[in-house]
Amino acid sequence: MTTGRHSAIELDPSLNDYELAAALVREAGQLALLMRMGGLQGERKTSVSDVVTAADRAAEAYVLEQLRRCRPDDGIRGEEGSSVAGSSGRTWVIDPVDGTYNFLHGSTYWCSAIALKRDQDASAVDVDPDVILGAIYQPELDKLWTGGDGHAAALNGERIAGPSNAALGELGAATYIHPTWLADPRAAMPWHAVAVSAASLRMFGSGSCDLGRVADGELGCWFQHSCPEWDWLPGKAIVRAAGGHTAVVNVNGLNWFIAGGPTAVSEIRGALTSVPQFA
């Protein structure tokens, strides 16, 4: 496929799902990085910090094209609007550039991420579907996390130890909350209850980069509300493959997504649900 003067390779359909996922995020990430080096401008989506670039769209188009050729029976869902119905009972969930605000402003803390999930019953509403595998690639640091069913979590092909089982009060917690939500007690109160319980806080702006680091132990745990599938499922698969725990809990009508060691996940859940419930 060619996008302007940037090109990415066609992938071999005989690759297994893990090999394919790893190749897709590597190629998409490198394509986005090359396009950024050539100069980009962002377009505002919902807020000044929620932006999209031509690189997001080109990287998603590349992944879409490769998946339609390599896995023609699978469904596809992408952050930038890709939607393909499948017949296999499986769907690929694409985040071509996670951390676009960071990406646009020259930070290295962004990635390309992908997950493969099992489709749910059409009548069901599941905010935390069953995920088969995940792959996350941070191009400028050349970090590739993979993991899922029957595939131990790995960083650049080396098995990782997994999250610590230490208490929340001994761990750094990665999180994200948009400033406008801090004015809404439905989100601000549960967020604050967890924030004051952790040893320290980190807010870097890429959920998938955060979750890869929770899986390999660089970050202690993670929590965030209202995550779309592309921000959650790639990292969820890898954290669980590393032996960590994940959970989703609803508080005041908002779903909170949690990852880490079993003790931290349990304590985050407890802190979130300790706040007053609004009618």
Image (tube, rainbow, N blue to C red):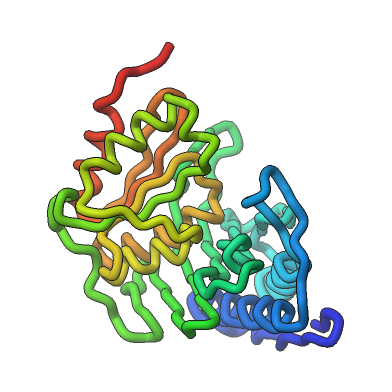
Q: Is residue 25 left or right of residue 83?
A: left
Q: Is residue 53 left or right of residue 160?
A: right
What number of labels is visible?
Answer: 0
Q: Does residue 13 appear in the picture of this structure?
A: no
Q: Residue at x 22, y 34 (%)?
A: 270
Residue 131 at x, y percent in the picture: 45, 56
Residue 25 at x, y percent in the picture: 58, 75
Q: Residue at x 45, y 40 (%)?
A: 225
Residue 76 at x, y percent in the picture: 66, 59
Q: Quadrant of the N terminus?
A: bottom right
Q: Residue at x 66, y 55 (%)?
A: 79
Q: Nearer the viewer, residue 252 or 198?
A: 198
Residue 199 at x, y percent in the picture: 20, 53
Q: Residue furthest right?
A: 4
Q: Nearer the viewer, residue 118 or 210?
A: 210
Q: Residue at x 31, y 53 (%)?
A: 201
Q: Residue furthest top?
A: 279
Q: Nearer the viewer, residue 137 or 173?
A: 173
